[in-house]
Amino acid sequence: MATLSVARSPPSACSPRRPAASNPNPLLPSRSTLAVCLATKPKVPLPIASPSPLGNDPAKWDPAECDALLRGGEQVASVLQEMLKLMEDMEMDGEFAAVAVELVAQGVIGNRVDEMESGFLMALDYMIQLAQKDGDDERHSLLEVVKQTVLDHLTKKCPPHVQVVGLLCQTEKKESRHELLRRVAAGGGVFENDKGLKVQIPGANLNDIANQADDLLETMETRSKVPDRKLLARLVIVREEARNMMGGGLLDERNDRGLNTLPQAEVNFLSKLVALKPGKAVETMIRDVMLGKGEGADNTEPNSDLEPPTGTAEKENVTDRKPHPVRPGMFLETVSKVLGGIYASNTSGITAQHLEWVHETTLRILQEIAF
């Protein structure tokens, strides 16, 4: 009989800060439980709730991260032990098996979600990485079920517009996202997503949805390194589509979030694009920047500050700070502001058409990156 290790010893870099004896022992589930783990197909986790990857080198984790991982790992092991105890007396055969695991997870986690450690999801992600490296499908599937259940419970505690942003980030097809936004704006209801699953969606304000996505984007893009390019692309798409669905479009006053001075890096890059004829070469330039290459490359130098992303003039750097790289969200915001100014002054022409093409092409590239 195969074994399912619910916890693994932490990396050596973390060991000195907490006694190794505190790590839980491996559990030996029944053969039927392993079959359930294999049969249960994990759902797509809510992206806005999942922590950033830990990285491959434990020696680079700080002490606080190590301690959070250890505490979270102990709690994950405790949850799995309670689940396995409840499943001992259950019939785990047939089609009911996968449903039974999810029901047990819902019950156990529902009673403990309010007391979970801050490192619970971090530990889950780390254990899932280990299971993938070990090729242990049983352990990986069970941990994915636990993670999805935790994220579901956390999502229900969020305001409606935050829940909607999470749902939109999980919806791959553009038409389905637009339908979801229409349902939400109309007061909510039952929605069938791309995977055929029916979910109850709340009613929410389109402006609140766009602003929530924009706040998350700002948090990610002001860092020296973007932790998740795929999530970043999804949030940009959510913001742009929610804004586009509002009555005023580009000129809607609700889209004005206080960006009075256009960011230098984005303006410089946009100037390069406008100077070239639309085509494959310009599309390649946009794609590279959206993927974090060229002008969009992260600042990887240690202990270096980013120059504030404001000011449109070509100024000589008089400090040692690196200029802010071009970020997808801020770039599309810049394009929209310039387009809005052109339309407001009734001077639309070739430049406006070029900017519209840049905006549309960027969104299409982000869609490819996001899903």
Image (cartoon, grey):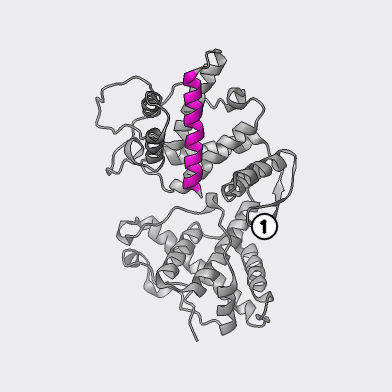
- Label 1: state its secondary structure: loop
Please identify the dominant SS of the magenta region. helix
- Name the side, left or right, on which 206 lies relative to 282: right
Viewer-nearest residue: 93 or 310? 93
**Amino acid type shown at disc 1:** Gly
Is residue 357 on the magenta stretch?
yes
From the viewer's perspective, tell me whether residue 10 is left or right of residue 231.
Answer: left
Mark 1 Cα within 10 Å, few/some/many (few <14, many 20+)? few
Occupied quadrant, residue 207: top right
* Residue wearing tag 1: 196
Residue 86: x and y, percent? 64, 77
Q: Is residue 302 visible?
A: yes
Q: What residue appears at the point 46 percent right and 27 percent down from the top-left corner? A: 334
Q: Is residue 314 magenta?
A: no
| Front residue (pair 276, 313) | 276
Residue 243 at x, y percent in the picture:
60, 32
Q: Is residue 54 above or below residue 183?
A: below
Q: Is residue 316 left or right of residue 163?
A: left
Q: Nearer the viewer, residue 324 or 27?
A: 324
Which residue is found at the position 53% from the left and 42% from the top?
A: 235
- Residue at figure coordinates x 67%, y 79% from the top left: 94
Question: Could you say where residue 183 lies in the image, as x and y percent from the top left?
Answer: 72, 42
Q: In the rendered view, does 270 fall on the left or right side of 77?
A: left
Vertical relation: 306 (above or below) 190: above
* 114 shown above or below 245: below
In the rendering, at what x and y percent does residue 104 appear? 65, 71
Comparing 284 with 271, the one in front is 284
What residue sits 51% from the left and 67% below the top?
75
| Span colored in magenta | 350-370
Q: Is residue 159 visible?
A: no
